[in-house]
Amino acid sequence: MTDSLFLSRLESNAVLIADGATGTNLQSRGLPRGVPSDTWVLERPDQILALHRDFIEAGADILLTCTFGGTHPRLKASGLAEQAGAINRRAVDLARQAAQGTQVLVAGSMGPTGELLEPFGPLSAGDAQAAFAEQARTLSEAGVDALVIETQFDLGEARAAVEGARSASRLPIVVSFSYDRGTRTMMGVRPTQMAKEMEALGVDLLGINCGRSPEENLKALQELRQATRLPIWFKPNAGLPHTDDDDHTLYDLTPEAMGAQAAEWVASGARVIGGCCGTSPAHLRQIALAARPA
């Protein structure tokens, strides 16, 4: 039996419900488009806290910290690199505050650096590994239950992220890729390739998040299930985005339509389910209801 609370909960439950989207929900609550959600960790913590609580009320077992862009290279682009430690620590504090008095787990979100690795971009694998190690260390020391390396598309960067996280933390690691080319990432990686590479690094869960639609992600999930025995994390988008007459971004799937698909995600092998872009607390409530039929 593991001494990790996160893995123990995974072993003792049929399915866990992860939360929904952070960025798109904060935009609906006033975050200007193009402004990183991480900025609100310090500037509008009340909104971060409110969103976490809304997801818990909707049925979430797992909250992700508002630290998707919390690596030094990504924060540098928005002039926040020197506040990286403060942002990551405060984000964990907010999630922990929301979860206080419940059994809800807190996972540290770790997104891509925003730069391509050499030879396609300016970032060396060593620098990427160091950036992820710094974030993983801060999140772990602040008190998360697991680390979620998410929305990955390149095996090299994902490898650097895992190796960096492992060098700084003993927490369980989820690695989740985004298949926005059907069953391939933008760099051409298939779920079978991802499973082979990431399993060899000793990660605890493999995942799929973001992408273009739940239907395409379901195909990726089915391929991934055939390629691994590890538990699978699954957080698709609420359909494709489009803008209305007021230039607001909307997503195709209603909460009821997204919830209607959740049982098939579980039947196809997902052990943790939730939603990515466009997934509101209302969407998550329907997902939770479908995953936990009365």
Image (cartoon, rainbow, N blue to C red):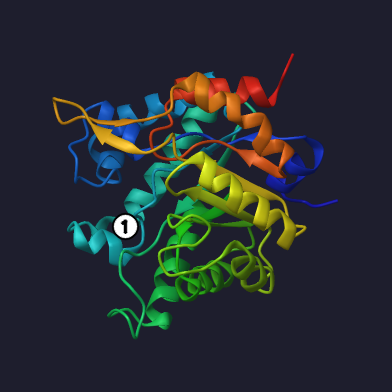
Q: Nearer the viewer, residue 232 or 70?
A: 232
Q: Position of residue 25 (x, y in %)?
A: 34, 31
Q: Position of residue 34 (x, y in %)?
A: 19, 46
Image quadrant for the C terminus? top right
Q: Is residue 170 visible?
A: yes
Position of residue 28 relative to residue 23, above or below, is above
Q: Amino acid at mark 1?
A: Ala
User: What residue does disc 1 label?
Assistant: 84
Q: Residues within 10 Å of mark 1 (few under 14, many from 20)?
A: many
Position of residue 281 relative to residue 177, above or below, is above
Residue furthest bottom in the image: 119
Residue furthest top in the image: 294
Q: Nearer the viewer, residue 99 or 288?
A: 288
Of helix, strand and loop, which one carries label 1? helix
Give residue 75's quadrant in the image.
bottom left
Q: Position of residue 42 (x, y in %)?
A: 27, 41
- Residue at horizontal 39%, vertical 43%? 66
- Residue at horizontal 66%, vertical 56%? 223
Q: Position of residue 240 (x, y in %)?
A: 37, 39
Give residue 246's quadrant in the image.
top left
- Residue at horizontal 25%, vertical 44%? 39
